[in-house]
Image (cartoon, grey):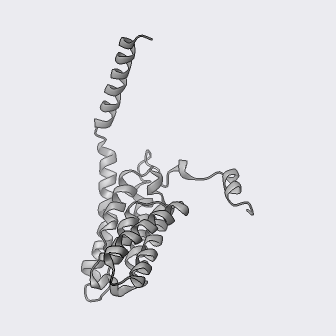
Amino acid sequence: MTSTKKLKRNYRKAKYVLYKETLIDFKEHFWAFLGSFVGLGIISLLQFRIFTSSDLVFLIGSFGASCVLVYGVIESPLAQPRNLIGGHAISAIIGVSIYKLLPDLIWVAAPLAVSLSIVLMQITKTLHPPGGATALIAIAGSDKIKELGYFYVISPVLSGAIILLITALIFNNIPSKRHYPSKGNFLSKKELKKRIPFL
């Protein structure tokens, strides 16, 4: 193949990819908006309207990033339920533990908590990028967050992640073209036996 033909073919491919990437899918955007609005809305409602008189915390920054994944890129392996729940839970436990070990060395505790969270999420196959923020919030968050100790894992982290998951399971499956969890992210029985021999 001549270099001119290669250039033309590569140009056509690039043009097609750019065209596909710039198409606006209004239905997809609608469902991503609606799901994230309702999911985060429920958490915000709990925080600012229902439990205003209590010290309970429900809303943390890492949930915003989780919404991007579980409503915006629902087929990503990082957006699947195991990753959403496991990634946040593991990171919260690590964040609280590191803060308890190094409460006066925040400059060491913060990167240590995030780095350990990444590695443990990789090991457990629960990698969820917002988990890094969840670990960091346990270290550098408000005094109210730090006072929660391990209760931080249950609320706001697990309670919020479960609310986002339930909302994602509902809104991501209403349109026929959206499927959550992604069907391609389930292991076959054969693959499960390879990984867990005693099954």
Identify the image quadrant of residue 71. Answer: bottom left
Q: Nearer the viewer, residue 174 or 104?
A: 104
Answer yes or no: is residue 128 visible: yes
Locate residue 46 relative to residue 122 in the image: left or right.
left
Is residue 50 depicted above or below 25 in this figure?
below
Picture quarter with the N terminus: top left
Q: Which residue appears farthest toward the right when viewing the image?
A: 198
Locate residue 199 relative to residue 6 in the image: left or right.
right
- Residue 151 position in % (x across, y down): 42, 84
Locate residue 131 relative to residue 54 in the image: left or right.
right
Q: Nearer the viewer, residue 122 or 174?
A: 122
- Residue 40 position in % (x across, y down): 31, 66
Answer yes or no: is residue 154 visible: no
Locate residue 50 relative to residue 122 in the image: left or right.
left
Identify the image quadrant of residue 17. Answer: top left
- Residue 191 position in % (x across, y down): 67, 52
Is residue 28 depicted above or below 148 in this figure?
above
Report the residue at 41% width, 49% height from top.
175
Is residue 73 depicted above or below 139 in this figure?
above
Report the residue at 36% width, 77% height from top.
138
Report the residue at 26% width, 89% height from top.
53
Report the residue at 29% width, 89% height from top.
54
